[in-house]
Amino acid sequence: MREMAAALLPGDGEQPFTIAWNNDGWREISAGAQIKPLWHAGDTASFLLRLAAGTRMTGHPHHFDEECLMLSGEAFFGDVLLREGEYQLAPKGLTHGEAYSDVGALIYVHGDASYLHS
């Protein structure tokens, strides 16, 4: 019924979709670091990044602008501490040092889709 009603409403493009935040769909990309893909198109993607307490990830260059929103916990990206509720834009061309979390973190990331294939 919903699909029939939606077909009669004006508008173009795809319909919105929802992904549940639960333990399904997480994939480990390094020791203590997991991602959950949310969306991707071409070279960009949105995903959740979950870091266990004590996790360390090597630094990397940014081939695209990368947005991060700390949903819970905290983590260092190089020498910058990002806490719950804080947003960071890492512009294209920037290289940051090691990322690590002493307490664990859940981060929303929009940027380079290559993480999905790590």
Image (cartoon, rainbow, N blue to C red):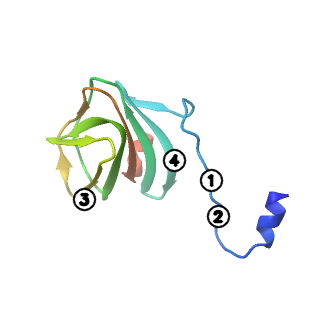
Around disc 2, counting alpha carbons within 10 Å, would you say few (fewer than 14), some (14 to 19), or many (20 or more)? few
Q: Earlier in the sequence, mark 2 or mark 4?
A: 2
- Label 4 is placed on what type of residue? Leu
Along the line of sight, the residue nearer the viewer: 18 or 83: 83
> What amino acid type should be assigned to the residue bearing mark 3?
Pro
Q: CA distance from mark 3 to mark 4?
A: 21 Å
Could you give the CA–CA distance between mark 1 and mark 3, rounded to whole angstroms? Answer: 28 Å
| Mark 2 vs 1: CB contact within 8 A | yes
Q: According to the image, label 2 marks what residue?
A: 14
Choose between 67 and 96: the one closer to the eye.
Answer: 67
Amino acid type of the residue that numbered disc 2 sits on in the rendered structure? Glu
Which of pointers 1 and 3 indicates the residue nearer the eye? 1
The number of callouts visible is 4
Report the Cα–Cα distance between label 2 and label 4.
Answer: 15 Å
Marking on residue 3: none
Where on the picture, by quarter, is residue 25?
top right
